[in-house]
Image (cartoon, rainbow, N blue to C red):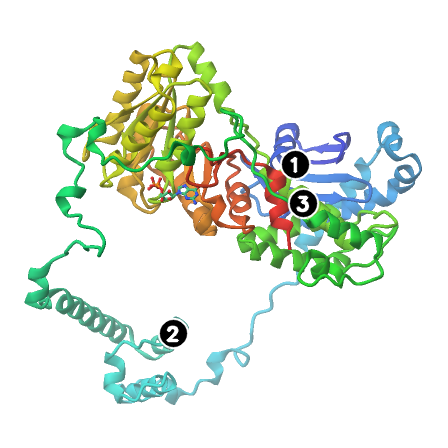
Amino acid sequence: MLDFFTIFSKGGLVLWCFQGVRGPAATAPVNALIRSVLLQERGGNNSFTHEALTLKYKLDNQFELVFVVGFQKILTLTYVDKLIDDVHKEFRDKYRNEFQQKGALGLLNGTFDFKDDFMRLLRDAEESSKVRAPTVMKTFEQSLKSQKTVKCMIETRGEKPKEKVKNKKNKGSKKDGTEAVAVPSKASAGDKQLSAAGDKEELTKDEILQKNREEFFRRHMKAGEKSRSPKPDAQKEKGKKPRVWDLGNSNAKVLDYSNSATNGSAEACPVEEFDPDMALGDKNREPGRLYDLEYESDDEAEEEKVVQNPSKPSVKKGGLGGMFGMLKGLVGSKSLTRDDMDPVLEKMKDHLIAKNVAAEIAVQLCESVAKKLEGKVMGTFTTVTSTVKQALQEALVQILQPQRRVDVLRDVMDAQRHRRPYVVTFCGVNGVGKSTNLAKISFWLIENGFSVLIAACDTFRAGAVEQLRTHTRRLNALHPPESHGGRTMVQLYEKGYGKDAAGIAMEAISYARNQGFDVVLVDTAGRMQDNAPLMTALAKLIAVNAPDLVLFVGEALVGNEAVDQLVKFNKALADHSMAQTPRLIDGIVLTKFDTIDDKVGAAISMTYITSKPIVFVGTGQTYCDLRSLNAKAVVAALMKA
Ligand code: GDP
C-alpha cells in the first residue's frame, strides 16, 4: 500500500529507503517536499500533497533526520502516523550510538540495515489498524425508540402549536401559537436550526412542506411589497445631485474631461500645481536605483540584554524583552520539548496576529517552528525564548524570500534583444494604487533608460484616463525628450471609455512594437474579486495579450482583506480562463506601506498563502516612493514589540 518510506539527514544524505512494488520513485516527490515545505517553513501540518501522492513526514531535530512516507492520496491509511512514529523511535534507538559518537561521519559511513525492522513495524501498524473492537449493536432497550410510548407517537394536529409556542417562548416571542409559526423568527441561526430540527421531528412531511411554502410566499410577498413600495415623489424627482463644496465653484462642465476631442492633448487637464521637487522626493538618491525597504529595529539590543542577564526579568514594559521576559529560562544542553516552547509560541502567535498576520497563518507558522525545534539540543547560554524567536525570524525571512525571483530590468533587456516590448499588466480592486504605482514604475524604468507606453485599459472608471494622462505629462516634464536624445520616454495609449480593454491592450502592444517602445504598462479597471463577468474580462485580457508579467496590486493598509483579494484574483483567473494552462498572477505590488507603521503582517500572509513574490512596494505618493522588498526589514518590523 505504501509507495515509499525514506529516511534522510537534513544535510541531504539518504540513509535508508523502502520502495513499494508499484510506487513511483521517491526522488521527485521528496524533492518537491523539501523545496516547497521544508525550505519554505510551511511545515505546520506534517502532510504534503504532490501530484497523486500524499507525503507525511516527521523531523528529528536532535539528530537532524527527516522521515518521509509516501502513498496514493486516494487511500486513507489510518496507520501511517503510527508507522512513522514507530519507525522514528526504532531507527533512533538502533543507531543512537552511531549518531552520537561519530556525528556526521556516522551518517556518511554508517550502514543502515533497517529493512527487517521496517517490515516488522509496517506489519504491526497494518495489523493494529485492522484490529478494532467490533461495533456492538445497541439493544432495543438501549435505543431511544424504546423510551417512546405509543401515546407520544400518535400525532394530533391540535397539539403541535403548543410545542411551537414553547419553542417560541424560549426565544422570547410573546406571540400566540399560530402567529409564532407564521412569523419567521429573528433569533440567532443556531436557535433557528435547533427549532427547525425540533419541528421536523414533530411534523409530518406534508406539514413541513406546507409550512415552508407558506414561509416562502410570505417572504416573496414582503420582498415584492418592498420593491414595489413607491418612493416619495419628491425624492424621485430630486435624483442625485452633485455636492457643491463651499470653497469651490466647480460644476459638472468644469469637471468633465472626458471629451474625446481633447484626448491626448495636454490642455485637456487643468494645469494643476506640479512641483517637480516634490514629485522627486529625496534629492540625494541615486537615479534609477530601486532602494530596499528600510526599517530600523531596536530589537537586537533588547535581545542581547535578555541573553546576557537571564536571571533578571526584563523591566522594559511592553518591549519584546518585557513580553517574553517572564517566559525565558535557561535550558542549557537540554533538548527542547513542546512544553518548554508552548508558552513562548502562544505569545509569539498573539504578537504576530497583533501585527496583522492572518490568525491561521500565525498558528501554522508557530506550529512549523515547534516542529522544527522539538528535540533540538540548545546551547548552554541560550534561552527558550531566544531560540524560538530566532527560529521564527528565520522562518519569516524564508517565507518572504521569493521562490521565483522577478528581475524586471533584466527581463526588459532580454525583451529588447528580441526586439519586442516587455508587457506588464496591473490588476487589483479599485483605489489600491494601481495607476499611481504604475506611474512610479514608469518613472523608475525611464530613469533606467527604457521608454514606456502606458496602455489606458481602465475604460470604466471616470477619470482613469485623465489620471494617466496627467502622470504621462508629469513624467515627460521630469524626463523631457531633450535629455534623452529627442526620444519621448513615456506616452499614453488611450481610446477613451467604454471600449474593450483587451482590444486596446492588443493595439497598444503592437503600437509599442512598431514605435520601438521598450515597455508597455497596461492599467486595468479595478474590479472586485467576486465579480465573475469582470474577472472573465480580465482573464481574457491576459490570455489574449500574454503579458510577460501580471502584477497584482494590493494595499498593505487593509491587511487580511488584501490576502483574500489576492487569493480570489488568482483563483478567478484560473477559473475564468479559457486556456488549458491559465495565466495566473506572477507577483505583487504592495502599496501604501507607509501608512501601516509596523503592522506589516499582510506581507507575510500574502506570500505565505500564495508563494507569490512581492516585486515592488509603494511607500508614498511621489514617484520615488517605490521600493523593493527587504525581507529582513519587514521581519524586523514584525518582531518589534
Ligand atoms: P487605483 O484606483 O487602483 O488606480 O488607485 P490610484 O492609483 O488612483 O490610488 C488611489 C489613492 O491611493 C491615491 O490617492 C494615491 O495617491 C494613493 N496611493 C497610491 N499608492 C500609495 C502609496 O504607496 N502610499 C500612499 N500613502 N498612498 C498611495
Residue 462, compared with residue 323, is above or below; it is above
- Name the residue carrying label 2: 188
Residue 338, compared with residue 424, is above or below; it is below
Q: Secondary structure at mark 2?
A: loop
- Among the 4 quarters of the image, the one containing residue 6: top right
Are the residues tagged 3 and 1 within 8 Å (C-beta)?
Answer: no
Q: Secondary structure at mark 1?
A: loop
What's the residue type where badge 3 is placed? Gln
Which tag is nearer the camera, tag 1 or tag 2? 1
Categorize mark 3 by other alpha carbons within 10 Å: few (<14), some (14-19), many (20+).
some
Quadrant of the displayed image that contains ligand 1: top left
Would residue 414 appear left or right of 16 to someone viewing this image? left
What's the residue type where badge 2 is placed? Ser
The residue shown at (58%, 39%) is 294
Categorize mark 1 by other alpha carbons within 10 Å: few (<14), some (14-19), many (20+).
some
* Of pointers 2 and 3, the one earlier in the residue sequence: 2
* Of pointers 3 and 1, the one earlier in the residue sequence: 1
Residue nearest the observer in this picture, 613 or 469: 469
Are the residues tagged 1 and 2 within 8 Å (C-beta)?
Answer: no
Q: Is any part of residue 55 visible from this angle?
A: no
Q: Is any part of residue 111 visible from this angle?
A: yes
Report whether the residue tagged 1 is closer than 8 Å to ligand 1: no
- Among the 4 quarters of the image, the one containing residue 256: top left
**Split into 4 quadrants, where in the image is the N terminus?**
top right
Residue nearest the observer in this picture, 276 or 230: 276
What's the residue type where badge 1 is placed? Leu
Residue 252, compared with residue 101, is above or below; it is below
- Name the residue carrying label 1: 39
Q: How far is mark 2 from mark 3, CA to CA?
A: 43 Å
